Amino acid sequence: MSNRVLKMFGQRVREERLKRGLSQEALAEKAGMHRTYIGMIERAEKNVTLINIEKIAHALDVEIVVLLKGINR
C-alpha cells in the first residue's frame, strides 16, 4: 500500500472531523479509540483496518465511502 493512500485517507478524516468541530480526542471517544491513534491516522502513520474505518465513519456520521472517495486516483 502506498503512503499516498494513507495520507489521503488521513486528510479526509481530518477534514470531516474539523467540519464537525470535533477535536481528535472527541472523535476518538465517539469511535471508541485512543486520541493518539486518531492523530496517527491523520498523519498517515497507521495503516487503519476496515473495522476501524467503519468506527470512524460511524463516529463522524458519514458513510464509509465519504472517507474513501477519490483515494484511488
Image (tube, rainbow, N blue to C red):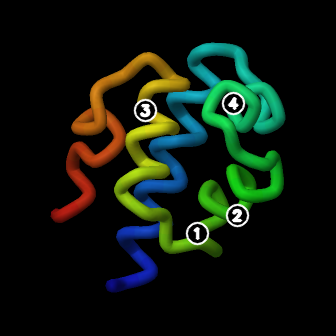
What type is the residue that disc 2 sits on? Answer: Met
Horizontal and vertical percent for residue 38? 69, 50
What residue is shown at x 54% (from left), y 25% (from top)? 59
Q: Quadrant of the N terminus?
A: bottom left
What residue is shown at x 57% (from left), y 18% (from top)? 19
Q: SS at mark 3?
A: helix
What type is the residue that disc 3 sits on? Answer: Ala
Q: SS at mark 1?
A: loop
Disc 4 designates what residue? 27
Q: CA distance from mark 4 to mark 1?
A: 17 Å
Horizontal and vertical percent for residue 68? 28, 48
Residue 22 falls in image quadrant: top right
Q: SS at mark 2?
A: helix
**Observer-nearest residue: 33 or 16?**
33
What type is the residue that disc 1 sits on? Answer: Ala
Q: Earlier in the sequence, mark 2 or mark 3?
A: 2
Disc 2 designates what residue? 40
What type is the residue that disc 4 sits on? Answer: Leu
Decide: is 7 above or below 24.
below
Q: Quadrant of the C terminus?
A: bottom left
Q: CA distance from mark 2 to mark 3?
A: 16 Å
Disc 3 designates what residue? 57
Horizontal and vertical percent for residue 62? 37, 22
Q: CA distance from mark 3 to mark 4?
A: 10 Å
Q: Earlier in the sequence, mark 4 or mark 1?
A: 4
Residue 26 falls in image quadrant: top right
CB under 8 Å between callouts 1 and 3? Answer: no
Instruction: Identify the mark at residue 44; answer none if there is no mark.
Output: 1
Q: Nearer the viewer, mark 2 or mark 3?
A: 3
For label 2, the crowd category at 10 Å Cα-Cα, with few meaning under 14, some 14 to 19 and many 20 or more, is: some
For label 3, the crowd category at 10 Å Cα-Cα, with few meaning under 14, some 14 to 19 and many 20 or more, is: some
Horizontal and vertical percent for residue 33? 70, 45
